[in-house]
Image (spheres, grey):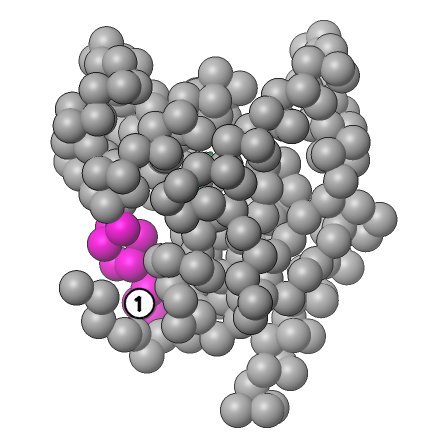
Amino acid sequence: MHIKTSVPIIAIDGPSGSGKGTVAAQVATRLGWYYLDSGSLYRLTALAASVQNIGFEEEDKVANIAKNLDVRFEGQSILLAGEEVTEKIRTEAVGEGASVVSKLPSVRQALLQRQRDFAFGLGLVADGRDMGSEVFPEAGLKVYLTASVAERANRRYKQLLSKGMNPDYNDIFDGIAKRDERDMNRSLAPLIQTHDARLLDTTNCSVEEAVQKVLDWWKEVNIRA
Ligand code: DC
């Protein structure tokens, strides 16, 4: 059962690589609120399943993993069963796995209350695919944050180059397009811009401009309330 929370919530949804995580984390810092990176829970589930040699199609077993995830968020670090996995869950392979397990209804159900439990303290900024539509439908502000596939591929390409890797732009582009297709067309909680979400296209805007826009919208929502 979902008990409505009095904690103010900003829900930021959008496709892979749109920069929603960076924007959401900075908005949370500026407001002094908590931040929930919901995608990390799906990534942790996929990682834990792989480590235990459980196939992503074994729905009951994967859901059981999601339900019992022994995860701790400590500042910027993420610990799974006591082991630091902050970097490990950001690989393309784990992201791909997360996209696959996130289609499983019982995995989504297992993670639902877990995500809602983050709504405490002064406020919560939550990012993902279904924050505004399913997890926090009562959020005071809903943002759909996106950027063109080419721009998102470009950002990822530069990020990997800066890490000393030798990425292939076309592979990255295709991977992002494939992930969009899966996240937007699954039957359960697909990525959509809900009618009450404001569109923020960051194709031609900086992180700082995007953060400021969300903060301005939040002020506006509260003046009207
Ligand atoms: O935001 P991300 O790239 O870390 O998310 C990884 C995958 O998890 C994404 O491809 C779809 C899934 N996901 C989801 O289904 N619902 C969410 N709220 C967040 C992520």
Residue 218: x and y in percent read 59, 76
Residue 76 vs residue 159, the one in the foreground: 159
Determine if the magenta segment contains residue 11: no
Q: Residue 160 appears in which quarter of the rendering?
A: top right
Q: Secondary structure at mark 1?
A: loop
Residue 225: x and y in percent read 53, 91
- Compared across the picture, whether 73 is left or right of 218 comes to left
Ligand 1 quarter of the rendering: top left
Residue of label 1: 120
Residue 51: x and y in percent read 27, 13
Number of on-image labels: 1
Mark yes or no: residue 69 visible: no
Mark yes or no: residue 9 visible: yes
Query: Which residue corresponds to the image point at 30% horizontal and 29% vertical from the top-left?
Result: 45
- Compared across the picture, whether 144 is left or right of 60 comes to right
Query: Which residue corresponds to the image point at 54% horizontal and 62% vertical from the top-left?
Result: 194
Q: What stretch of residues is rendered in magenta?
A: 112-123
Q: Residue 188 appears in which quarter of the rendering?
A: top left
- Compared across the picture, whether 88 is left or right of 210 comes to left
- Compared across the picture, whether 66 is left or right of 158 comes to left
